[in-house]
């Protein structure tokens, strides 16, 4: 029987994990005739009792596996770790907060097995319960990314999806440190089906994505899959060069005809400040690309594992072996 691995990135999800486990195992029971289930939790340096809850779930159910990072490396690193260690023929990514309904895995599985898709992904068609300003900027981000990049971007797409092993292996070939998984999954191609669903609020706990983090994440996507900002900064430079040339011609003609070359200092100061600001803006764009390149060439690991279920199972095995040896010595 083939296996389905569900990758679940976790960061301070102690409250919601028991609820998530109950829901995912209910889905596993519904699909037990088709696939074996494996739930792979990736603890992204949580500060609460998330790791302890996961360990308890593993002791109770060996279908639960886990990897725990030495510190917080981010959701992108957690997803990559899960993809690297997933053993399933089909691999799913979903959040632990139940905003990605686990029961959708049944429809996703049917889309791959019965309809021949390589990937079945979810996209939100509504954003009830989400701040309007956040929803507005999210929609604009997808529009901007679609305009600037060469990848296909679907408005409302989330990380929740089920993929074949072939597609997972293709994603793992892209091992860059500056990761934007939505863009990577689009770049590798493969036949994808989109399933619409309505936004679901968290079952427990608090969101870890602030507006600032989302803004930085969106910049990661644009810089990682488009060089358009560099081209835009070059175009802005050409425009201001042309404007400055016209301004020089205007000043020379005005001086020759009317004289009075000393007037207009306030407007001149404003122009200098504006042009300086544009220059700094363009330098900032260049610096972003240079900084990403600097991080890539150092080849630091995407994540570091502190403890995993394999370590725990080995310790248990050693203890069992020592106990047996003690019994033999006693005899």
Image (cartoon, helix red, strand yellow):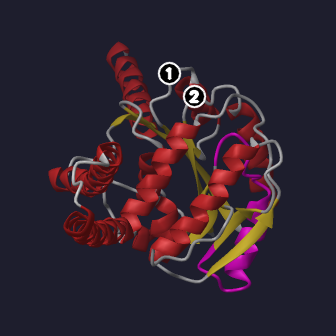
Lower position in the chain sequence, tag 2 or tag 1 = 2
Q: Is residue 85 above or below residue 9?
A: below
Q: Which labelled disc corresponds to residue 93?
A: none
| Residue identified by numbered label 1 | 47
Question: Residue 104 location in percent, x, y?
Answer: 77, 61
Q: Secondary structure at mark 1?
A: loop
Q: Out of 74 and 53, give the one closest to the viewer.
A: 74
Q: Is residue 118 magenta?
A: yes
In three-dimensional space, the C-alpha distance between marks 2 and 1, rounded to whole angstroms, equals 6 Å
Question: Residue 20 location in percent, x, y?
Answer: 72, 40
Determine contact: label 2, label 1, CB under 8 Å.
yes
Determine the residue positioned at 44% across, 54% down: 219
Question: Residue 186 location in percent, x, y?
Answer: 51, 73
- Residue extending furthest top? 330
Instruction: Tell whether 265 sits left or right of 166.
Output: left
Q: Is residue 70 above or below residue 140?
A: above
Q: Out of 25 and 323, give the one closest to the viewer.
A: 25
> In which quadrant is the N terminus drawn?
bottom right
Instruction: Tell whether 314 sits left or right of 254.
Output: right
Determine the residue positioned at 80% across, 57% down: 103
């Amino acid at each position: 029987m083939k296996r389905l691995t569900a990758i679940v990135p976790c960061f301070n999800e102690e409250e919601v994990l028991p609820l998530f486990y109950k829901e995912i195992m209910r889905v596993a029971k519904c699909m037990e005739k088709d696939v074996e289930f494996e739930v792979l939790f990736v603890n992204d340096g949580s500060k609460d009792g998330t790791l302890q809850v996961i360990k308890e779930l593993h002791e109770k159910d060996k279908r639960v596996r886990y990897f725990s990072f030495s510190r917080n490396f981010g959701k992108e690193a957690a997803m990559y770790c899960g993809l690297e260690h997933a053993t399933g023929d089909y691999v799913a990514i979903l959040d632990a907060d139940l905003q990605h309904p686990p029961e959708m895995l049944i429809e996703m599985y049917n889309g791959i097995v019965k309809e021949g898709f390589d990937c079945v992904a979810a996209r939100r068609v509504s954003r009830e319960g989400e701040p309007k300003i956040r929803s507005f900027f999210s929609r604009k981000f997808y529009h901007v990314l679609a305009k600037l990049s060469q990848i296909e971007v679907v408005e409302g797409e989330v990380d929740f999806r089920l993929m074949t092993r072939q597609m997972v292996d293709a994603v793992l070939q892209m091992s860059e440190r500056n990761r934007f998984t939505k863009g990577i999954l689009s770049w590798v191609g493969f036949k994808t089906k989109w399933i619409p669903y309505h936004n679901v609020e968290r079952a427990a706990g608090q969101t870890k994505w602030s507006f600032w983090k989302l803004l930085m994440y969106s910049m990661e996507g644009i810089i990682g899959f488009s060089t358009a900002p560099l081209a835009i900064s070059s175009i802005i430079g050409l425009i201001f060069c042309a404007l400055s040339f016209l301004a020089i011609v205007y000043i020379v003609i005005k001086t020759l005809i009317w004289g009075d070359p000393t007037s207009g200092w306030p407007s001149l100061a404003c122009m200098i400040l504006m042009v300086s600001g544009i220059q700094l803006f363009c330098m900032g764009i260049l610096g972003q690309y240079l900084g990403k390149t600097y991080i890539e060439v150092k080849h630091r690991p995407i994540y570091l594992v502190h403890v995993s279920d394999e370590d725990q199972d080995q310790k248990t095995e050693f203890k069992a072996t020592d106990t047996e040896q003690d019994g033999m010595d006693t005899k």
